[in-house]
Amino acid sequence: MIARRLMPLLLLALATGCSEPDSQAGFAGLAEQAGEADESGFLQPEPGDELVFPDDWGPHPQHRIEWWYLTANLETADGEPLGLQWTQFRQALKPRSADAQPPDAETWPLDAAWMAHGAVSFAGDHWFEEKLARGDVGHAGATAEPLQVWLDDWRLEAVQGEDHWRLQVNGDGWSYDLRLGNTGRPVAHGDEGFSAKSASGEGSMYFSLVDLEIDGTVTLDGESMEVSGRGWFDREWSSQFLKAGQQGWDWFALHLGGGQKLMAFRLREDDGAFVSGSWISAEGEVISLGVDNLTITPETWQETVEGRVPVRWRLQIPERQVDVTIAAPEGNYWNTGLYPYWESPVSVSGSHEGVGYMELTGYSD
Amino acid sequence: MLVRAFISHYRRHPFQLLALALMITLATMLWTGVTVLTDQARNSLFQSEEAVAARVQVVRTDGQPVTVDDFAWLRMAGVCVAPWLEVQRPPPEGRVIGIDPLALGCFGESAPGGEAGDLDGEPFMDISEAAMLSAKGADSQLYLLAGTDDESLPETYALKDFSLSPPTGELADSFLLNLDALSLLVLLITGLLVRSVHRLGLAQRRDSLALLHRFGVPRRRVRQLLVLELMALTALCVLPGLWLGAQLAGVLGGGFGQALDNLFDVALYAGSDESLPWRAAGVMVLLVLAVCLLDWVLPRRWQNAASSGRGLRVAGLVLLAGLTGVVLAPGLGWVFAGTALVFAGAGWLTPALLAMMAQRLSGSASDTGVSPLLGWRRRELAVMFRQLALPVVALQFAVATVLAVQALVTTFENTFDDWLAQRLEAEFYVEVPVGADAELGAAQLRELEGIGPWHRVTRGEASISPADNDGKGAVTPVDLFALGPVGELVADWTLLESSARPWQQLAQGGVMINEQLARRQNLEVGDTLDVTIADTDIRVPVVAVYADYGRPAGEVLIHRAQLPEAFSAGFESFSVNPGERTMAEISDRLADVWDTSNLTVRDNASIRALASRVFGQTFLLTRAISLLTLVLAAVALLIMGWVFFTTRAWYFQLLAVWGLPATMLRRQLQRLAVTLTLSVTAAALPLGIWLTWVLVSRINPLAFGWSLPMAVYPMFWLELGLVAAGIGLVIARLMRRQLEGPTPLPPASRMTGAER
């Protein structure tokens, strides 16, 4: 209850930084319309910014928000589809230059907070858990080299001496321990990694690993299952994600049957929507998509306890002869954390077949 | 026109209106104030319990204090811990607690603070702010609270109970229950007072209301107007009463909150339900309407029968049923019901019995040729007891309540003093750190020359069974205390029952048990017990029963030489009087021998001084409430007495007409008034003593399983008698002024057969 009392205040402070708390509180953009980044001292990504490896696998303390995000469309040994998600967010209250020393942990600093989400979707059921931590204390953080992202005992790390990562996550009645093998180079979205999020130019730095080979063990209610399949890993950071007037986003990451990959998102605005995406050919060529060549339309809505949410979509890219229906399986896929959002595996049908993941924010009542 | 005629009574008798308004306002103030405070206290205690209930902390087995690194390491190892940074700021700011809200998620519903209500602001703050205060020089201590007690901890850590203050057992619960009982009594008394003032007004309006009826206004209409008048007056008076009640709660709440904070480790920060004053007001409106309109609801023959011989027999039966019910009651509800019956019976009987007694004495006075004035005074007293029955009963109840509350509070204070004395018997108290060898510490103390008396207390678990049950009887788990060496520090323990030289017998292999265990198991000195400690059975004689001051758990106390080797201590400590040494020197030596820089040393003397001081402060509230109730009842009696005397002024004047000198008349009235109030106080004595007994010997055992010792305080009775005499003198003084003015003629109804 102390948490309930202090948490909103804390997160409001985290979400709004030093700006006036006139915006809706959120965490790393989940329900956020941030204030003016320039006045707060945070760096704002802009066209022309470049991705730098391996540094960009690690945290960006000069930016307000960022996340490491995995979705996976797996199958059990019986061929049953199983979806899972892991996300770790960092949200800063104060900017810090990349080479500055972190404050002394003994002072329990509150320069940044971390939040991790883990979820498993299987046979119509959905398991979800959320963890929170303050930064610079030690039990949550990230490093670029070697890659490590952790919060308590949830951990993603590069396995030393080998070319794969390991992800261990456990919740109440569920857990997974996965091996992630990377079979491709990072895909930079937008303009060399700068991904616009509105027509007026605000945006984020955004790249993905779009074709991870995953295998491992998922345990649900005490029953362990061997699983394998493909995953999608995102890295994204910014200091201003949703601008005023934007209500939320609809995001899709799809693995298509022909080896193509598709990332598309739609930011809902008062007077329409801003759409963007990336088409990645089977050969790895990346083509940016925008309002001129990408259409995303909700088709079927589902009434849920948390709110009314579109569970069936039509996505068209005429110049690529893509006209597909994206549908969530039956079930309730709300991640009911501090800021509820919908996160479900999807199936793709129509001009292309495939699987993928869909994230919808801003639909919670 | 009708309304004007209707309220013209109050134009002629504005003081009556004022009296009724004053009663309703003061009653609302008292009831609201008491209700708000009780509610706040309950919420605060509840939240405090939630905040630290059954909590455990993680400590390092190497005796070093836990740090932020330990926290991070444990979290990454999958252990659910949360930091709790206590920072002591110099007075008046006091203690604050830094917490990390982000770390509490793993606790789920059992998070510190639980799910009840709001903990708003101090003493809680974000841990970074608390750390900042600590960095500025304030004393601080970091604790790591653990989620459950079955964490699979790394070997270098251990779990330990987490408590912020000496446990006060159920004293706090008992305190609240008694506040509740007090609130109900306040409500009852205020109801009686309002009814008495209202009835007096109604009696005086009887003629004018009858006149209205004769002029053609239907009785139903008159009643409707009376209800409307009462509702309007109540609504008008309840509002200022509410405001005054909030002020009263605010004034008393300051000291009360501080006392709660210090005594029970609870701040009065919880606040109360915002709707509470309005609910209190609602109760008051209903009460006023109910007590004032009771006559219309009760059949007239019931009302007439109430004061008849048959009615009094019924009252006697009600009283008897209540007394029996309270003695035999199997549950708390029955005790409350029985108490209500006793109050109803006593309230019904007292005025009639007092009147009867006065009447009989007046008869005997005239028969034996004693002064006719004495006879007159006693007859007049009998009339007053009948006419002023309600305020008399209200004053009786108020005095009884004050008596009971005073006895209860004093008993609580004495019990608490004894409780502290027993637990804080030494000047200092040193906790043996987790993982440390207590024997090393004991050896150090034995070698130290000039040290005062000390002993080592080891706590653990054991089970007992009576030695003669052949293993068939129930085996009872108990808390085990092992003491050694037995020395001066325990010499002052209160032993309720003991053999000769009990402490020597303990050292030679006896066992002492606590009061509650003795009661529950019917054990006494000389019985033999089988005590099982770490799977080892020992057969020991009971050599003493010691007072436990309300701790419901069973306890056995043995000499530590009797502990089997396999016994594993749950907790160990040393009670030390430094003697010629300084405590700093002693604690340094112990810290060295245990290789720790984190030794918990408690200064018992200052804790006792603080606790005693704040306990007195806490009970100031109870005393203030009971005193206010008494004042209210006294004001009511004053008003009633004055109005009543006024209506009889013409009759008193007759005495002067018949030749009684004015000085003598005034003296007679003085005696009359003082006898009236003193008689009521005397009638309240048995009720007050009985109520004390019910609170300490019936309600507490049924509610909490333990009882307080019963005590009476005759000096306080004397003080109350003086207050009562004072009230009587003020009434007489007012009468004197009344008699100096022109004497009104009695109303017609008074001349035609009514009691004179």
Image (cartoon, coloured by chain):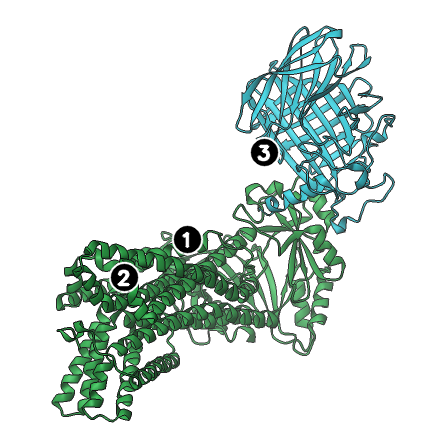
Q: Chain of mark 2?
A: B
Amino acid type at image mark 2: Phe
Q: Is residue B476 visible?
A: no
Q: Position of residue B658 (x, y in %)?
A: 18, 91
The residue where tag 1 is placed is B279
Chain represented in green: B
Q: Chain of mark 1?
A: B
Cα–Cα gap, marks 3 and 1: 43 Å
Task: Tell me residue A271's x, y (percent).
Answer: 67, 23
Is label 3 in a helix, a strand or a loop? loop
Q: Chain of mark 3?
A: A
| Disc 3 target residue | A172
- Distance, label 3 to label 2, CA atoms, is 74 Å
Q: Of the residues tagged 3 and 1, which is closer to the observer? A: 1
What residue is rendered at 36% in x and 74% in y? Answer: B634
Q: Amino acid at mark 3?
A: Asp
Q: Nearer the viewer, residue B153 or B282?
A: B282
User: Which disc number belongs to residue B294?
Assistant: none
Tag 2, which secondary structure? Answer: helix
B283 to the left or right of B503:
left
Q: Nearer the viewer, mark 3 or mark 2?
A: 2
Callout 1 secondary element: helix
- Badge 3 crowding class, 10 Å Cα cut-off, few under 14, some 14 to 19, many 20 or more, is few
Q: Is residue B597 left or right of residue B460?
A: right
Q: In the rendered picture of this protein, how many numbered marks are placed on residues?
A: 3
Q: Residue at label 2?
A: B6
Q: Which chain is cyan?
A: A
Amino acid on which the number 1 mark rests in the picture: Arg
